[in-house]
Amino acid sequence: MSQQIDEAKLHAFIGKMLGDLGGAMSVPTVRIGLRLGLFQALAAAPADAGELAARAGGLHPRYVREWALAQAANGYVDYDPASDRFSLSPEQAMVFVVPDSPVYLPGAFELVAAMIEAEPRVEQCFRDGSGVRWGDHAGCLFCATGAFFRPGYVNNIVQNWIPALDGIEARLRSGAKVADVGCGVGFSTMLMAEAYPASEFVGYDFHEPSIDEARRHASEHGLGDRVRFECAPAKAIGENGFDLVTMYDCLHDMGDPRGCAAHMREILAPGGHWMVVEPIAGDAPEQNMNPVGRLYYNASTMICVPTSLDQEVGEGLGAQAGEGRLSAIMREAGFTSVRRAAEGPFNMVLEAA
């Protein structure tokens, strides 16, 4: 290397890498703490390692102490050296303990673990240009994906996204027919069904285990008679006459998003609307060089692009497709009105009619 090294830049970069590696190494310890109920137990009251181990059901105190010190070093719990006790602040609890918090993130740690497990399969895709079928990634990726997106849906679908659509909320309250395409394990579909009991909801997904899980969730929440789940690819949905079609974080995963867009127009009733929720992104890559873009580009490399390339056409839009490309696909399908109806830190909501 002939270029002179800038020592300040080198040390800054090493500092960044130490932070990144520390975050990566936190994934297994956080997952263990979540599965063993350690965060939940600590949220009840401050505790030393022995008390926390007992409170979590009789765990081994030595392991619990090392775990708690690791989380304190992560900044995920607080540590008081004077009393040798650990505690969880209200802000930390919102991330690790409160399921309906908008920043509840356990699903993100499960998603990262699934991405790491799928690494050999995705590496092979780099070599041969193939894809990875959605159900074949690793572990329960579809469960982790549902858990990751659920907090955003709980805090936005009914409160912010549907009210931002043109006249749709009133139609849902009076009684409308809705297709939730790419519904996954059904969280989005059930949230809408709970909020708008006069309307009819059908959730569609091409992944049968996800549909099985969605039906189980609907039954457990007493919604089995108000929502229906069907296994079908987006372009193969035979039913029509929908007043609203929703797609939550899935259009970019589809192999043929253009064909899907054309079919959505076909299954809509006259005057119907299509709501597409997608990861927030600028139209140029340089606009996405930020913490949110970083998350989405990495997830897209490991999940979204391989999923799309496994399917028919395999366009591979990626999770940072941007409003421009997505809107063009909608207009190409025959939608004459396309607009950004709402946005947040992680998502944008496009409405087509």
Image (cartoon, rainbow, N blue to C red):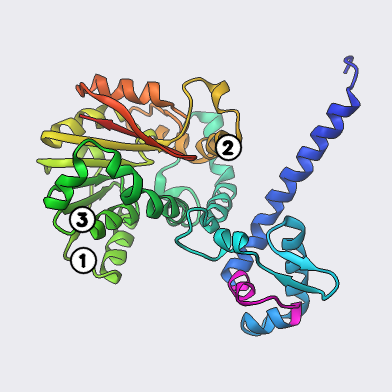
Helix, strand or loop: magenta stretch: helix
Name the residue nearer the viewer: 40 or 131: 40
The one of 124 and 276 positioned closer to us in this rendering:
276
Amino acid type at circle 3 is Tyr
User: Mark 2, mark 3: which one is toward the viewer?
Assistant: 3
Q: For residue 277, what is the image quadrant?
A: top left
CA separation in Å, label 3 and label 1: 15 Å
Residue for point 60% across, 64% down? 90
Local SS, label 1: loop
Q: CA distance from mark 1 to mark 2?
A: 41 Å
Q: Earlier in the sequence, mark 3 or mark 1?
A: 3
Residue 307 versus residue 97 in the image, above or below: above
The reply to whether residue 131 is visible in this rendering is no
- Give the residue at x 78% y 77%: 62
**Which of pointers 1 and 2 lies earlier in the amino acid sequence?**
2
Mark 2 neighbour class, 10 Å CA radius: few under 14, some 14 to 19, many 20 or more: few
Q: Give the quarter of the figure containing the N terminus.
A: top right
Percent position (x, y) of residue 330? Answer: 27, 25
Q: Tell me the kind of residue under disc 2.
A: Glu
| Label placed on residue 196 | 3
The location of residue 305, given as percent across then percent down, is 46, 34
Choose mark 3 or mark 1, whichever is in front.
3
Is-magenta flag for residue 58?
no
Looking at the image, which residue is at 33% across and 24% down? 327
Among the 4 quarters of the image, the one containing residue 39: bottom right
Q: Which residue is mark 1?
A: 224
Position of 110 relative to 315 (above/below): below
| Residue carrying label 2 | 123
Mark 2–mark 3 Cα distance, whole angstroms, equals 44 Å
Q: Please report the bounds of the magenta region as a residue range.
A: 37-50
From this view, report whether residue 168 is shown above or below residue 112.
above
